Image (tube, rainbow, N blue to C red):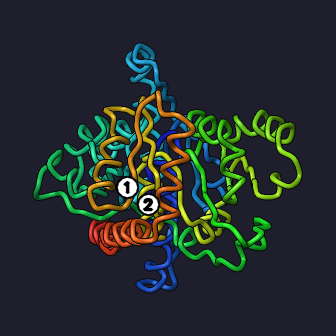
């Protein structure tokens, strides 16, 4: 069996693809232990190439560009590339996450009469997935609120695919890996697959306050790591530095350990992040990316807040002290902390429908 993934850009597209591939592979071995699942990915501007390779997915690049004029001028080239690679691979099914180039892959698949399933991670559907829904046989959505953007008869709720390894972390192993001292509560700070300058600055500007009470695991993004490392090494004395753990990026296994040891998470509002936090049942403070397309991160966060799972903070004028006080508010109030844990776990119930993706893919492909 051959599956072709269409996805672009960031970890928000790539990590669910890897999750689907790993889950499909496991289920396919049960159905047909003598056969092999072959996985391919077509996309452009892929950041997480190493993770794709390690997952055993063969990647084929096509031209993509975020500049509208270049997209218009070079779209014929992209379409020809998509036509060639889809013909060359000739998969049994196409699974599209949207993003740069996915429209042309889905169009090529439709021309070749290959079954197509698309997945929309966010609460507000992307324009690419709206266009691709015309060609799709089935449409999976993470949030129930997203169904309204697509034809009802083709659409089902699936949650957001998460790699199994993400939810298998051990607190004991995490304590050893991060060298956690153990006597303080742990704050996990992250900004998505590329880091978040705003969140980094909010933490660093109040770092003395955090480290006087808590232990911090800070995933800052590879492009921010060098400057933050120099800054924090210069300002933190040894008695505080031992409570601060700075990383540019964590692997899936390492992320599972970070989630396992964390008492609260400070993060952006990408769908992948929200569903990972929910699956672990962690209280969280969510700071949506202001510039996200169609403000989908804000909508994601609002939905998560409605079930009592997080505190939502927004606005460019958000201050370091205000964020610190919200962290205190959660970690020093056991009733509030427990309500947020229960809200996150209830929200994670959507994930029980994740296996529907595999079922639909097999029905289309076999």
Q: Gap between marks 1 and 2, in whole Å?
A: 7 Å
Choose the circle earlier in sequence order: 1 or 2. Answer: 2
Q: Residues within 10 Å of mark 2 (few under 14, many from 20)?
A: many
Q: Residue 340: which quarter of the image?
A: bottom left
- Element class at badge 1: strand
- In the image, 112 versus 18, the foreground residue is 18
Residue that appears at 34% across and 41% down: 298
Quarter of the image for the N terminus: give it: bottom left
Percent x, y of residue 323 = 51, 44
* Mark 2: secondary structure: strand
Q: Is residue 89 left or right of residue 158?
A: right
Residue 335 location in percent, x, y? 40, 71
The residue at 51%/67% (across/down) is 163
Nearest to the observer: residue 220 or residue 340: 340
Contact (CB < 8 A) between labels 1 and 2?
Answer: yes
Which label number is shown at residue 95?
1
Residue at the (24%, 50%) spot, across then down:
136
Per the image, the residue denoted by label 2 is: 3
Query: Residue 236's spot in the image, x, y percent?
Result: 83, 44
* Image spot of residue 129 (x, y percent): 29, 42
| Quadrant in the picture for the C terminus | bottom left
Q: Residue 127 falls in which quadrant of the image?
A: top left
Q: Which residue does the image show at 43% across and 47% down from the upper left?
A: 269
């Amino acid at each position: 069996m051959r599956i072709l993934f269409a996805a672009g850009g960031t970890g928000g597209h790539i990590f669910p693809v890897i999750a689907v591939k790993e889950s499909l592979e496991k289920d396919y071995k049960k159905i047909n232990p003598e056969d092999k699942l072959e996985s391919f990915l077509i996309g452009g501007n892929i950041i997480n190439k190493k993770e794709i390779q390690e997952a055993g997915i063969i990647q084929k690049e096509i031209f993509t560009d975020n500049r509208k004029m270049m997209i218009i001028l070079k779209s014929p080239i992209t379409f020809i590339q998509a036509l060639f690679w889809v013909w060359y691979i000739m998969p049994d099914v196409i699974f599209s996450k949207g993003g740069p180039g996915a429209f042309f892959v889905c169009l090529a698949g439709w021309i070749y009469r290959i079954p197509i399933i698309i997945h929309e991670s966010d609460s507000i559907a992307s324009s690419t997935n709206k266009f691709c829904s015309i060609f799709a046989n089935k449409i999976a959505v993470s949030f129930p609120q997203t169904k309204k953007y697509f034809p009802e008869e083709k659409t089902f709720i699936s949650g957001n695919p998460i790699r199994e390894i993400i939810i298998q972390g051990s607190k004991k192993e995490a304590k050893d890996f991060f060298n956690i001292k153990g006597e303080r509560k742990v704050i996990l700070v992250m900004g998505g697959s590329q880091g978040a300058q705003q969140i980094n600055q909010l933490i660093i500007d109040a770092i003395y306050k955090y480290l006087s009470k808590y232990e911090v695991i800070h995933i800052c993004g590879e492009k921010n790591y060098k400057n933050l490392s120099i800054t924090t090494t210069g300002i933190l004395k040894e008695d505080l530095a031992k409570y601060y753990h700075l990383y540019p990026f964590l692997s899936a296994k390492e992320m599972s350990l970070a989630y396992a040891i964390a008492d609260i998470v400070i993060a952006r509002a990408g769908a992948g992040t929200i569903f990972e936090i929910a699956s672990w049942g962690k209280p969280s403070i969510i700071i949506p990316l202001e510039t996200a397309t169609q403000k989908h991160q804000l909508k994601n966060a609002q939905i998560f807040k409605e079930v009592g799972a997080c505190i939502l903070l927004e606005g460019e004028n958000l201050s370091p002290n205000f964020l610190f006080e919200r962290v205190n508010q959660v970690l020093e109030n056991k009733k509030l902390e427990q309500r947020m844990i229960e809200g996150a776990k209830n929200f994670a119930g959507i994930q029980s429908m994740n296996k529907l993706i595999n079922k639909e893919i097999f029905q289309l492909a076999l």
